[in-house]
Amino acid sequence: MKYQLFNVLPEFGTNTYLIWDEQSGEGMLIDPAAADISMMDKILEMNIRIKYIVNTHGHGDHIAGNAMASDVFKAPVAIHSRDSGMLIDPAKNLSLYWEQNLRLPSADILLSDGDQLELAGETVKIIHTPGHTPGGICLLCDDFLISGDTLFAESIGRTDLPGGDYKTLIRSIKEKLFSLSDKLLVLPGHGDSTTIGTEKTDNPFVGLAARI
């Protein structure tokens, strides 16, 4: 599975990811952060057929491009069931507070922990990692993990926003992510990539560095 990063909302530094199977051209768009036509055109030029649009959680800086992407690619939008109400409520998705007032269409697919989305015979596993939001998820492919705002390079998602809970987030990371391979590449919702092994050692919130 291949991936490409887009940064279409630089003021928030949100990482939007395109993942796809090179042989079949089937792909998935994850966290379309803005209604950015240049990103959509680029994907069309690559002859990638978007099968799903997936939100790792329901904050406005990760969902703003849902409607345009769904219209352009004729693909369903998927989000965890516990964050689904955030799509339609600008207070819950926090866009109200940065004057966007995002009221997006409801999700077509409601995800749960352990669900699998299929791309050209390969599976993308949904891992429910609440804490940043109640319905935060990570997406596990064979050789990389898209971690949304759960786990960052030497940091974690904030938990001071509505629905956040620090202890829940720490438990999600330690129990569900740190059980994965140390070599697994982590592609976070903001900032640079890392690995599970690096975060086990260097992360000051959940790694060995937290105990020093």
Image (cartoon, helix red, strand yellow):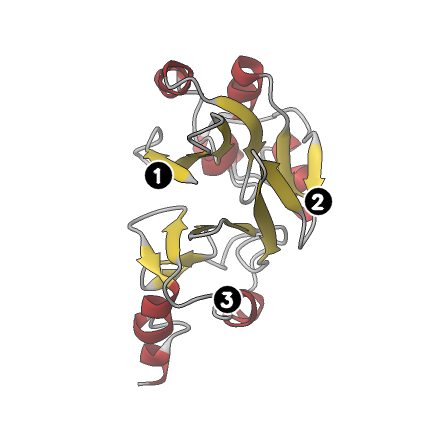
Give amino acid for label 1.
Phe
Please tell me which residue lies in front, 145 or 137.
Answer: 145
Give amino acid for label 2.
Ser
Seen in the image, is 176 located left or right of residue 145?
right
Q: Residues within 10 Å of mark 2 (few under 14, many from 20)?
A: some
Please tell me which residue lies in front, 111 or 144.
Answer: 144
Q: Which is nearer the N-term, disc 2 or disc 3?
A: 2
The image quarter in which residue 185 lies? bottom left
Residue 32 higher or lower than 149, as above or below: above
Tags 1 and 2 touching, CB below 8 Å? no
Q: Residue at x 41, y 46 (%)?
A: 189
Separation of residues labelled 1 and 2 (CA atoms): 25 Å
Q: Residue at x 60, y 50 (%)?
A: 126
> Which label was assigned to residue 12?
1
Q: Quadrant of the N terminus?
A: top left
Q: Residue at x 50, y 64 (%)?
A: 177
Secondary element type, mark 2: helix
The x and y percentages for residue 195 are: 35, 61
Residue 40 higher or lower than 163, as above or below: above
> Which label was assigned to residue 171?
none
Label 3 sits on residue:
173
Label 2 sits on residue:
81
Tags 3 and 1 touching, CB below 8 Å? no
Tags 2 and 3 touching, CB below 8 Å? no
Q: How many labels sit on residues?
A: 3
